[in-house]
Image: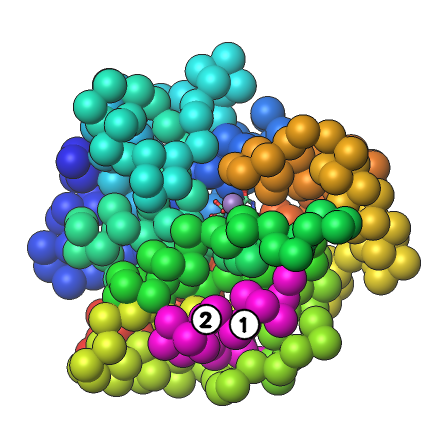
């Protein structure tokens, strides 16, 4: 593992650090835009008083905190970074490959590096079955890792392309506390509300930090999910959202896209078919989440 100098200095002296993932850059946003978002996200974390640590695998090494050249590689489609979930870390390291880390693999690496707060876009979850299928059997490793890794993940819930009810059930079964941030509804990524509630609500970074600190003192080894809805002015229009969703699902069902490729293909459909409107939503929610993650990390560093 190679930890950037500013990140290791912050970890050594107890300054707040926020982990950031690379899959949302390499596989969730188009080239060009992704590089701007990579900088904007790091700037937002710094502005809130924490040190950003973007995580990826480069040349078979776990990297915690990237320099501009590292961010260039992650964001360059010609570099062709693989999407690495938790199961892919061993192979990528052993074979000396490059790859972008998902929430699952980023949380594992963050925890191994001593980072306890992670800001991102949307959590992976339980995928809906295709027509005629009883179950998709596609349950994101993000849920498994959150169940067993004491990292607080700040995100805008899960995408509406997933089975939100089933995802919430799995989070409960796997003992992951879910905190709605200034909301009583479980957020659905592009939309601020789903049809489902959250078990707990917090209204300040200090309250979120207090819950995370108490959860860590307790016997569970799970993470905490802080569900922060997209800022209201950036929410995707409901009718547009519903149209994109049914089109995207039909597109995937009619194709042979499976497994880890499903989420990038759906995101790409949203971005192109909405003429970029969903991109603005996606960028705004990521910036809001990493800012909140930094505020929570600052409270935790204070001893919250
Ligand atoms: N949310 C986004 N963009 C993304 C993802 C989530 O706004 O690219 C990524 C995250 O890295 C998440 C992954 O961990 O999708 C989940 O993929 P899957 O559904 O294949 O588990
Ligand atoms: Mn999957």
Pick the quarter of the image with the N terminus.
Answer: top left
Left or right of residue 285, residue 48 in this image: left
What residue occupies the far top of the structure in this picture? 78
Q: Position of residue 103 (x, y in %)?
A: 41, 50
Q: Is residue 124 left or right of residue 105?
A: right
Residue in front for this viewpoint, 165 or 51 = 165
The residue that label 2 is drawn on is 171
Residue at disc 1, secondary structure: helix
Tell me the residue at 38%/71% (across/down): 174
Cβ of mark 1 under 8 A from ligand 1: no
Where 203 falls versus 251 (above or below)? below
Above or below: residue 139 compared with residue 91:
below
- Which residues, given as a range, are shown in magenta? 163-182
Residue 17: x and y in percent read: 27, 56
Q: Give the residue displayed 51% in from the left and 86% down from the top.
A: 199
Instruction: Give 29 or 167, whichever is nearer the viewer.
Output: 167
| Whole-percent x, y for residue 87 in the image | 32, 40
Residue name at image x 39 percent, y 85 percent: 207
Calculate the distance from the C-alpha at mark 2 to the C-alpha at mark 1: 5 Å
Residue 168 marker: 1
Q: Are marks 2 and 1 in contact (CB under 8 Å)?
A: yes
């Amino acid at each position: 593992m190679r930890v950037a100098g500013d990140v290791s200095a912050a970890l050594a002296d107890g300054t707040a650090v926020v982990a950031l993932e690379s899959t949302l850059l390499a596989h969730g946003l188009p080239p060009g835009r992704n590089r701007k978002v990579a900088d904007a996200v790091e700037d937002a974390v710094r502005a809130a008083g924490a040190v950003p640590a973007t995580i990826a695998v480069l040349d078979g090494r776990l990297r915690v905190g990237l320099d501009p050249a590292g961010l260039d590689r992650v964001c360059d489609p010609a570099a062709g970074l693989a999407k690495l979930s938790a199961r892919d870390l061993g192979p990528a390291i052993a074979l000396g490959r490059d790859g972008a880390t998902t929430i699952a693999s980023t949380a594992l690496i963050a925890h191994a590096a001593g980072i306890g707060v992670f800001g991102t876009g949307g959590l992976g979850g339980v995928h809906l079955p295709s027509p005629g299928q009883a179950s998709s059997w596609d349950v994101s490793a993000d849920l498994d890792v959150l169940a067993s890794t004491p990292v607080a993940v700040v995100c805008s819930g899960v995408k509406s392309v997933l089975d939100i009810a089933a995802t919430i059930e799995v989070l409960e079964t796997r003992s992951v506390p879910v905190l709605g941030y200034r909301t009583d509804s479980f957020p659905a990524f592009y939309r601020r509300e789903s049809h489902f509630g959250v078990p707990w609500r917090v209204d300040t970074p200090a309250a979120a930090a207090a819950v995370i600190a108490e959860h860590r003192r307790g016997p569970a080894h799970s993470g905490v999910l802080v569900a922060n809805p997209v800022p209201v002015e950036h929410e995707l229009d409901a009718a547009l959202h519903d149209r994109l969703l049914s089109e995207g699902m039909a597109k995937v069902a009619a194709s042979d896209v499976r497994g880890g490729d499903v989420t990038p293909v759906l995101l790409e459909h949203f971005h192109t078919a909405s003429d970029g409107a969903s991109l603005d939503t996606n960028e705004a929610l990521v910036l809001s989440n990493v800012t909140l993650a930094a505020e929570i990390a600052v409270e935790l560093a204070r001893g919250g």
